[in-house]
Image: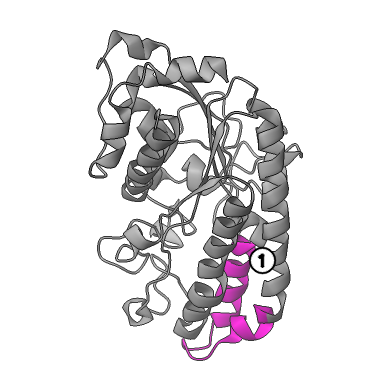
Amino acid sequence: MTRFRKRLALLGSAATLAAGALVPVQLAGASPAAAASYEWVALGDSYTAGVIPAAGDVFEYPRDGCERTDRSYPQVIDRDLGSLIELTNVSCGAATIEDITFRAQEPIGRHLPPFSEDPDYPFPAVPPQSEAVTSGTDVVTVGAGGNTLGFAQMLITCLERGSGSGGVGTPCRDELAGSVPERLNKVSTDYGEMLDKLRERAPHAKLLSVGYPTVVPEDTSKCGYNNFEQFGSITRGDLDWLREDVLEPLNKVIEKSSGDHDASFVDLYDSSRNHSVCDSGKWVEGIFTRLPDQVAFVHPNARGHQNAADHVTSALLNAISPN
């Protein structure tokens, strides 16, 4: 704790920066004292790692299959905050909460049959992400829960059940709705266990839980049936169900678990409401960014990651400010 307080003295104007408008912060070279950096560990799934080409280029070689991209929000913040922070980014596409807490993960890269095949698949296992967190860590951000919920598999089911429906009805809801409470309960349990593990490994670190952005618009008439640069063959009724009964409750579960386990919740949903997959200024790509060769499978693009970076930067600076 003494070391952490000493570092706080180096922050200077960070609290003022955090209180201002949410814009990218340029601190590189701001002060020689900032060379004594705060240790930040970024954990999470593909919504943190980046993964898709629309979120930048994979910059780590040889590839480990986690597909961290250079325009994902941890990398954006790392560049913006310069020497104030020292980032360790171990986020990984397809990670579940258990992969963060205790289980070695076998990454999938960009292997998502039938949509895409990764020539380097399969990849060796990577360690549980929590192992990157140590007693010297000052801030931990974590964005996870969608894969524990099984959102990718739900999307595939919705695509299959909506195919040939003409966009009418709720065939996916009819099949999957009964499983949603149990899925959300598992997210809640696993999320709490994860935060407890992170607290055990870094007793004095600030924990920031990053929520998910708006994916489905409130007005699903914006979404064209069989438009695979949006939601493909998923019906509008099922899109409404996914928004109201799956994605919004997922964020609420994460927020509640965070509050119950001494972590701060970073909300990305409200700021992205008008930037869904079906909006003209979208921050989340659809099934494809570009047919037929650029699979996105409903992930944030670089603009979405910039929005996340703005909000996480504010939360991060608040977390390490002396007040």
What residue appears at the point 65 percent right and 29 percent down from the top-left corner?
A: 203
Q: In the rendered image, which quarter contains the N terminus?
A: top right
Across the whole image, how many numbered discs are drawn on residues? Answer: 1
- Give the crowd class for mark 1: few <14, some 14-19, many >=20 residues within 10 Å: many
Q: Say which of 304 and 31 sits in front.
A: 31
Question: Is residue 113 something one can see in this rendering?
Answer: no
Does the magenta portion include 263? Answer: no
Residue furthest right as drawn: 103
At 57% from the left edge and 53% from the top edge, which residue is drawn? Answer: 259
Label 1, on which residue? 184
Classify 12 as above or below 175.
Answer: above
Identity of the residue furthest to the top in this view: 32
Image coordinates of residue 7 in percent, x first then y, are 45, 17
Q: State which region is magenta.
A: 150-177
Q: Is residue 312 above or below residue 159?
A: above
The quadrant in which the C terminus is found is top left
Q: Is residue 160 magenta?
A: yes
Decide whether the magenta segment is chiefly helix, strand or loop: helix
Asked if residue 180 shows in the view, the reply is: yes
Compared across the picture, whether 192 is left or right of 219 comes to: right
> Can you give x and y, in whole percent of width and height, for residue 255 in the image?
54, 57
Q: Nearer the viewer, residue 147 or 245?
A: 245
The amino acid type of the residue labelled 1 equals Leu
Q: Position of residue 158 (x, y in %)?
A: 58, 75
Quarter occupied by residue 69 = top left
Name which residue lies at 55% across and 73% down: 159
Q: Going by the image, does 66 lie left or right of 30?
A: right
Is residue 14 shown above or below 244? above
- In the picture, measured across the screen, residue 127 lies left or right of residue 154, that is right
